[in-house]
Image: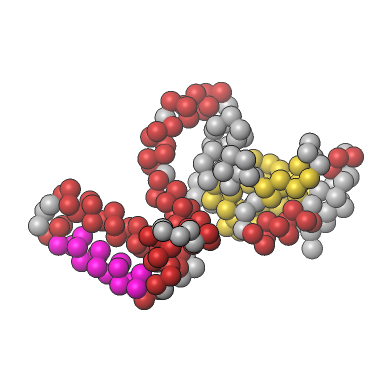
Amino acid sequence: MIRFEELDTAKDCTGLVPAIIQDDTTLSVLMLGYMDREALDKTQKEGRVTFYSRSRGRLWTKGETSGNFLDVVSISKDCDADTLLVRVHPHGPVCHTGTTGCFADEETRKAVAAGAQEHRTEGFIRQLEQIIRQRHRDMPEGSYTSKLFNRGVPKIAQKVGEEAVETVIEAVAQNRDAMIYEASDLIYHLLVLLEATGCSISDIEKELERRHR
C-alpha cells in the first residue's frame, strides 16, 4: 500500500508521492515527478507514465504533447512506501531542454546537442523496439509490422528463421554489405518476435548478464 497521505510538507503536495524516473537500460535517473492514486492507477493500466501536475492541477501523461512517452518497465516502492521508483524505456529526450534527463549539467547539455545524431544512431535498436511495441499497441492499417502481428507467432518465427539462413549464407560467402542487410532484417524480425511473445531486449540482457556472472 502506497502511503499517499504521508507527504504533507506543502499544500500543493498533499496526497502525492514523489516518483523517481530511471532509465531501465542505462540506470540513469531521468526526472522526478509526483503521482496521486489516480495517476498511479493510470500509469499501471496504460503502461505509460502519468503524473499529477501541480502547476496544471490535473493528470499529465509525460509525452502527451512532445511524443516523448515513458514506457513502464517496473514500479517499486521504497521501504517507507512513500516514494516510487519507476523504471522506463523513454521515447526520446525526457527534459524539455532536449537532454536525456533533467539532471544534466551545462556541459552535458552542450555535449548532447553536439552529439545528438550520434546518440540517435547508437540507440536506434532501442528506438526500433519502442516503435514495434507501439505498432503492436495501435495496429495501424497498412503497416508491415501490424501484418506480422496479425499472422501470429508461428509465422513471425518462420520469418526469423528465413532471415537467419539468409544472414548465414551471406556471411559464409563473405559478402559484408549483403550480410549487414540481411542481419538487419533478422534483428528487426527478432524484435517483432520478442514483442509478440511478451519479451524484450532487457530480458535478453538480463539473461546474458546472468550467464556472464
Query: What range is drawn magenta here?
Result: 155-169
Q: Nearer the viewer, residue 25 or 120?
A: 120
Q: Nearer the viewer, residue 17 or 57?
A: 57
**Would you say residue 157 sits in the magenta stretch?**
yes
- Specify the farthest residue to the bottom: 154
Q: Nearer the viewer, residue 46 or 85?
A: 46
Q: Is residue 24 left or right of residue 119?
A: right
Q: Is residue 36 left or right of residue 140?
A: right
Q: Quadrant of residue 12?
A: top right
Q: Quadrant of residue 154?
A: bottom left
The location of residue 136, given as percent across then percent down, is 49, 62
Q: Is residue 122 left or right of residue 45?
A: left
Q: Residue at x 58, y 39 (%)?
A: 66
Query: For the N terminus, which image quadrant?
Result: bottom right
Q: Residue at x 38, y 34 (%)?
A: 118
The location of residue 195, given as percent across then percent down, is 46, 64
Inspect this view and state whether residue 24 appears.
yes
Classify 27 as above or below 133.
above
Q: Quadrant of residue 28?
A: top right
Classify 195 as above or below 80.
below
**Would you say residue 160 sits in the magenta stretch?**
yes
Total labels drawn: 0
Query: For the C terminus, which image quadrant?
Result: bottom left
- Specify the farthest residue to the front: 142
Q: Residue at x 11, y 53 (%)?
A: 174
